[in-house]
Image: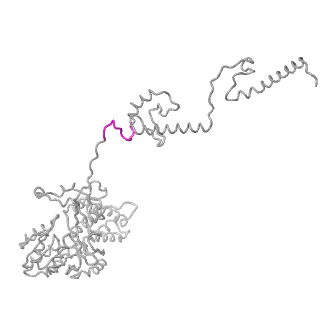
Amino acid sequence: MGSATPDGLLAGASQKGSEDVRSNRTEKPKESQEPHSRNTSSTTTNGVKEGTTKPAEPKTEKISGAEMKKRMKAEKAAKRAHSKQEQQTPLQDAQTSGGKEKAGKGPTTQSFQSSDPKIQHRRSGSTATAQKPLQLRPSHQQGPDPLPEPKTEVKKVALFSHLYGTPRRTTIAGAGKDVHPSVLALGLQMGNYVICGSSARCVSTLLVFKRVINAYTTPPGTSLPRHLTIHLSSQIDYLVSCRPLSVSMGNVIRWLKLLISRVDPDTSEPEAKSELCSAIDSFIRERITVAGQVIASSACSKIRDGDVILTFAKSSIVERTLVEAHRQGKKFRVIVVDCHPLNEGRNLARAVATLGLQVQYVLTHTLSHVIQDATKVFLGAHAMMSNGRLYSRIGTALVAMMAKEADVPVIVLCESIKFTDKVALDSIAINEVAPPEELGYSGAEAHEKESPEKWRDSTNYQPLNLMYDLTPEEYIHMVITEYGSLPPSSVPVVHRLSTNT
């Protein structure tokens, strides 16, 4: 190869420089699309001459995707910590003290609080204004919370915990609007023991239901047999809330509902209501009034001159028997054994003494002494179980047991309406728990003796006020019903006979 001349080198250099200029002109649009421009440029745009230098721009640090994620996580964690801190203090403190702290601090990268008076919660999405503070944990600056009112502890005996239901209704407040006024009055009377006794409660219930039926009007679009049963159910629910139903009341209610279901839908409403009321009157007359007269006459024949009749508490059928025997001119003496808290025997002793009979009134703690003088024991019944056991006022089993030990016959006077197909082995599974407040003394006795109501705060005091107990059939000598005198083992037979008729 030959050596190059200086002129040839200069020509090659000038040719190469012109090619570089053309390449720079073609590559300039690509550089303008990049996010960061160069400091110098050999070409100009918008009137800038070639070869001039641009003013230096501030350099920005490039952030990778991983670093961006870390920053986002840190910001989220800061937001959560800030929201938790705001929830621990009330909104008023945040507006006073928190506003001053934020004013003193410098600007942050991203502000969590907004200048909007409404604060938006991220989780619940609800808004709270400054006028309505959030119901959050109170701060110590507002002072301690007022102490809650002490709740009266309802002490229950564990063995009888299944018998505790809702407290008895003592007022008509909260009663349904479809409850008849007479039902409202009856419920309160039974709850306050104004109407007490199985037979009296049964008769009162039937008479009240008779008023309910007379005031009833069948709604349009339904029939009397279908809707009247539903209407009576609301009346029954109110009575149950005042006091649990007796066995005789349960039998009567089942009979009445069955009678209503058998009413012909084609029968006019006045005629159907008249038939139902007539059936109720016949039931009271035949199954309760006449049955009581028959039982009283049969039991009166068991009384001889010179007998000492011992009875417990108060039974309407026993009282009728004693009155009938006195009317027949028989000479006998009566011992009335009573117990707290109802003290029903006082009324029986007062009624019998008014007739001129010799009456001795004692409490159960003297029973072992007076049982030696008795020749017969007459007891009333709340119900007769299918296994022949007597379900009656608590204390009856004690009287029957003491009479059995003293070899004194125990005679139970009971209408068949009180028979039930239930079987009971003890008084724990089936019973009624009365309010414990009834165990306290009332009247003048409350000032002389310490009432159990004062012991309510004692941790060792657990009151239990049972209403009934169960007497085994081996302590019962005879059961007198309107069907005659029979042993306790024949109770289920009489119950089936009375139910089918």
Could you say which quadrant of the image residue 168 lies in? bottom left
Q: In this image, 26 relative to 257: left or right?
A: right
What residue do we see at 67% from left, 27% from top? Answer: 36
Q: Is residue 479 left or right of residue 128?
A: left
| Picture coordinates of residue 134, whole percent (x, y) | 39, 39
Residue at the location (7% across, 81% down)?
305
Residue 147 within the magenta-colored segment of the rendering: no
Q: Write the start and end of the magenta stretch as one range.
A: 132-144
Residue 375: image quadrant is bottom left
Q: In which quarter of the image is residue 334?
A: bottom left
Give residue 99's position: percent from left, percent from top. 42, 30
Residue 383: x %, y % from top left: 24, 73
75 left or right, relative to 171:
right
Residue 346 at what x, y percent from top left? 12, 67
Nearer the observer, 146 or 439:
146
- Front residue of 33/323: it is 33
Front residue of 5/483: it is 5
Q: Is residue 218 left or right of residue 44?
A: left
Instruction: Give the residue at x 14% y 76%.
Output: 321
